[in-house]
Image: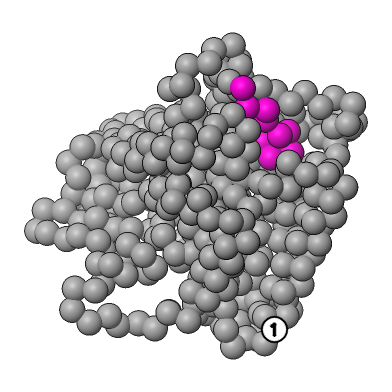
Amino acid sequence: MAVPLCLQKEAEVSGSRARIDSVDLVRGIVIVIMALDHVRDFFGDPTANPTNLASTTPALFFTRWVTHICAPVFFLLTGTGAYLTRARMSKTALSRFLITRGLWLLVLDVVLIRFALQFNFDYHVTVINVLWGLGWSMIVLSALLWSPLWAIASFGALLIAGHNAFDTPGIPGGMHVLRAFLHQPGILYRSSQSVVVVSYVLIPWIGVTAIGYVLGAAYRSDAVFRQRLLLRLGTALIAAFVVVRLVNVYGDPAPWSTQHSLLWTVLSFLNTTKYPPSLLFLLMTLGPAFLLLRVFDTWVPRVLRPALIIGGVPLFFFVLHFFVIHLLAVAVSYLRYGTVRDMFQSPDLAHFPFSAPPGWGVGLPAIYALWAAVVIALFPLCRWYARVKRRRHNRWLGYL
């Protein structure tokens, strides 16, 4: 049974900012889906590559593929949320908030999230992940927001559509460090004792955030215009994905090819590059994201109300779910092997985020069951924290 938003438009208030249910709901859905991928990372076969068509299975491929929508939605709605925050902040205050919150996310990523993933502080291996990209996107957006919306939209579209022109391998001298920071995931720092790897680079993620900021303006305009815009954007991006992918010349460093069956040809067609996200990857994921925003702009199914609550406290869920998943892995290791030592060891990249014991890994049915258990366990905590944020107006609550 659905609840029409025009009848139940709660417009929940966090501080003095009205929340948009459709935005929170889509964010909540994708962050729950994201947890599936992280459960698979910890409990799946550590030698299996879900996107390697030579060794994967369709079920494993689609378990990974469905989670591709998560990161683009996070970056898109980070920009949208920033624009909506303008309802209670001046541009100067918003710019300052984006800088401080962006810096906070950088610290969270390299300290707290790193610990949650590895359960050690030896810093032999540090993999810089999504909060790093989100943090820098906020910092860049703090400067961009002083420009007119058309200029911000042009900047974002240029990065998204044009960055694959710079996919050429081989960068001379020390430029590989700058490249790893800006565009091509890779090693940012290496010594005899430690290595730092960037997986979420700035380009084109800051472009996606910029587009999200411009999208925020649609949530301050007429509902009919917004719904028509979301539908047209979603349809256009999906159509563009199909056309550009069929041409098979530009938009992804890995072209698709005809396989031994129709199913595997479809898998090759859908197998776009996430690190960094190619133009085709973003067309493939942002198109459905816009359509989801359109669908939920007018109604919210009751069955999805828990996702709406989680979507109101996404960073809280994000931080906690890594601890819960890793603690579950520790418990499984103890029950199966009688030891937990390997769960705290990540001496090199081959053993990230932990040193999997021989025979580690469970099948997809168990992974899906563990995923459900993690989400169910975290929901009461998210509901509690959402109530805390509604009752209290402490500024620090805006940082988690």
Number of numbered labels in the structure image:
1
**Spot occupied by residue 209 in the image (x, y as percentages of width and height):** 54, 53
Location of residue 33 with respect to 320 vertically, above or below: below
Kindly tell me whether residue 306 is visible in this rendering. no
Which residue shows up at 80% across the image and 41% down it?
297
Q: Does dot 1 land on a helix, a strand or a loop?
A: helix
The residue tagged 1 is 246
Which residue shows up at 80% across the image and 56% down it?
229
> Relative to residue 101, is residue 32 drawn left or right?
right
**Spot occupied by residue 352 in the image (x, y as percentages of width and height):** 31, 51
Kindly tell me whether residue 300 is visible in this rendering. yes
Q: For this rendering, which residue is in front, 336 or 304?
A: 304
The kind of residue on which mark 1 rests is: Leu
> Relative to residue 14, is residue 108 drawn left or right?
left
Q: Residue furthest left?
A: 192
Location of residue 209 with respect to 7 vertically, above or below: below
The span shown in magenta is 16-24
Location of residue 228 with respect to 377 vertically, above or below: below
Which image quadrant is residue 30 in?
top right
Which residue shows up at 61% across the image and 56% down it?
149
**42 drawn magenta:** no
Q: Residue furthest top?
A: 391
Location of residue 247 with respect to 305 vertically, above or below: below
In the rendered image, which quarter contains the N terminus? top right
Way the structure is coloured: one colour
- The crowd level at tag 1 (other Cα within 10 Å; few <14, some 14-19, many 20+) is few
**Spot occupied by residue 302 in the image (x, y as percentages of width and height):** 82, 29
Which residue shows up at 67% across the image and 36% down it?
24
**23 drawn magenta:** yes
Which image quadrant is residue 174 in?
bottom left
**Spot occupied by residue 287 in the image (x, y as percentages of width and height):** 71, 61
